């Protein structure tokens, strides 16, 4: 079965997380993603915490299915080869600190002069221009600057970051969307686009509900733990067996269903809890009542009542429970990524399923520079490439061995 992005070529300078997550989705749907890594180290995630026989789980998770070549963009001969590849590509994607590509002599004007259809996408913490453009950024710092941390954490407590790298992920997703829109337009008009994605902009976009409320009222939101400002009961409620269930009652109709499912008609009859606004204002009293009731039953018993009543709830699973979750197993959400040395890592798979496209569960993970001669063979002869890259790949092997030896 064909994939929707087959025939498209992406030149990928990205590293760490936001950029690789963007190009991972493009690769999953058929684009040829050529990961360009700087020798002798390459992407730092090749040396993550989970190493088995000198290969990394972190790298496999974000870069499965991609090709890998090595290019030193400070070397004019290497840069010339890259510019030849640009003629064959649909997009160039990078997530360096703004200004880095310019130091290599690469900008959108240079790229579109070579290939007018090229899309040049950059992901950064704060965007390519503006007073914060030059600030170095990682996921946690952008969570802080964007306001995301200010509403996360226990009520009355200090702000905390999300456990997931949401700034990186949202930036990567927006970059993927922007790149696809640019490629789509290039197919129609023959002209590509410069795409500039800020992780901070992306997180503010994700905060639209709370942010739009603040912009209207001037009331600054604060952390509320597992509660929610606009309705109740919403939160985690502990059951008799010590396990908690996450409950969401977001509408008046859901409130009625919730009360019926738990056989608590007096809750629904309480005139002070008739509307979302009233319940939100009195959420502490409602939380007390829900906690009182849940403490009388094991979590399975409560879950059964809520399921039969068609209420919205979720178990608070740890990663072990998720890895063994029946829905995860059914949808084949966990896939395999295998390196050339035979080491296989189980990693999260593509979250988007499409008709007439079978779920892929087996992927490769490329060694650093493994596809250098194949890919660059399109733009240079093999004798030239061997003279240029044999010494480089020897340095790569030596550097990797030194790093992996230290981690053992």
Image (spheres, helix red, strand yellow):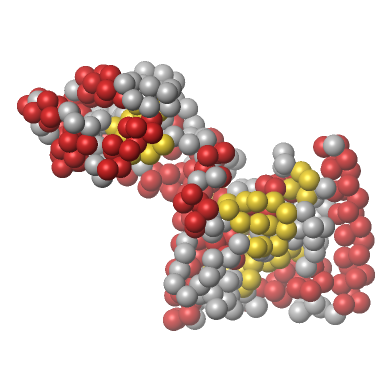
Compared across the picture, whether 37 is left or right of 240 comes to right
The residue lying toward the viewer, choosing from 338 and 193, is 338
Q: Quadrant of residue 392?
A: bottom right
Compared across the picture, whether 309 is left or right of 177 comes to left
Image point (76%, 79%), residue name: 378
Is residue 106 depicted above or below 378 in this figure?
A: above
Image point (78%, 50%), residue name: 55
The residue lying toward the viewer, choosing from 329 and 28, is 329
Compared across the picture, whether 169 is left or right of 218 comes to right
Residue 386 percent coordinates (x, y): 90, 71
Residue 114 percent coordinates (x, y): 63, 76
The quadrant the C terminus occupies is: top right
Image point (81%, 55%), residue name: 39
Q: Quadrant of residue 259?
A: top left
Image point (72%, 39%), residue name: 49
Is residue 274 depicted above or below 384 in this figure?
A: above
Q: How many marks?
A: 0
Residue 400 percent coordinates (x, y): 85, 48
Q: Residue 37: in sight, yes or no?
A: no
Q: Quadrant of residue 135?
A: top right
Residue 227 percent coordinates (x, y): 31, 29
Q: Residue 364: in sight, yes or no?
A: yes
């Amino acid at each position: 079965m064909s994939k929707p992005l087959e025939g498209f070529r992406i030149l990928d300078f990205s590293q760490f997380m936001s950029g690789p997550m963007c190009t991972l989705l493009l690769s999953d749907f058929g684009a040829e993603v050529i990961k360009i890594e700087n020798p002798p180290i390459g992407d730092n995630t090749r040396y993550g915490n989970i190493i088995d026989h000198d290969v990394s789980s972190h790298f496999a998770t974000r870069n499965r299915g991609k090709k890998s070549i090595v290019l030193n963009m400070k070397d004019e001969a290497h840069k010339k080869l890259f510019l030849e590849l640009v003629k064959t590509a649909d997009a160039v994607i990078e997530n360096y600190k703004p200004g880095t590509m310019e130091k290599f002599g690469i900008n959108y004007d240079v790229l579109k002069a070579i290939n007018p259809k090229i899309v040049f996408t950059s992901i950064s913490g704060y965007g390519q221009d503006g007073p914060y453009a030059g600030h170095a950024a990682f996921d946690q710092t952008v969570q802080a600057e964007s306001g995301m941390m200010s509403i996360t954490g226990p009520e009355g407590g200090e702000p905390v970051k999300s456990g997931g790298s949401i700034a990186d992920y949202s930036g990567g997703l927006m970059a993927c969307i922007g790149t696809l829109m640019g490629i789509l337009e290039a197919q129609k008009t023959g002209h590509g686009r410069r795409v500039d994605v800020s992780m901070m902009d992306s997180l503010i976009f994700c905060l639209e509900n709370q942010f739009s409320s603040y912009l209207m009222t001037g009331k600054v939101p604060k952390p509320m733990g597992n509660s929610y400002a606009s309705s109740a009961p919403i939160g985690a409620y502990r059951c008799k067996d010590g396990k908690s269930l996450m409950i969401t009652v977001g509408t008046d109709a859901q409130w009625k269903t919730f009360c019926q499912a738990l056989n608590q008609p007096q809750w629904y009859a309480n005139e002070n809890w008739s509307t979302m606004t009233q319940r939100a204002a009195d959420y502490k009293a409602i939380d007390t009542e829900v906690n009182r009731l849940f403490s009388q039953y094991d979590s399975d018993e409560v879950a059964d009542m809520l399921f039969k009543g068609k209420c919205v709830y979720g178990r608070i699973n740890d990663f072990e429970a998720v890895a063994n979750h029946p829905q995860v197993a059914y949808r084949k959400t966990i896939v395999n990524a295998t390196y050339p040395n035979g080491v296989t890592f189980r990693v999260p798979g593509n979250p988007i399923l499409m008709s007439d496209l079978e779920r892929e569960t087996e992927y490769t993970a490329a060694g650093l520079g493994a596809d250098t001669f194949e890919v660059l063979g399109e733009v240079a002869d093999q004798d030239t490439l061997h003279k240029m890259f044999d010494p480089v790949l020897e340095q790569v092997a030596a550097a990797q061995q030194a790093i992996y030896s230290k981690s053992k």
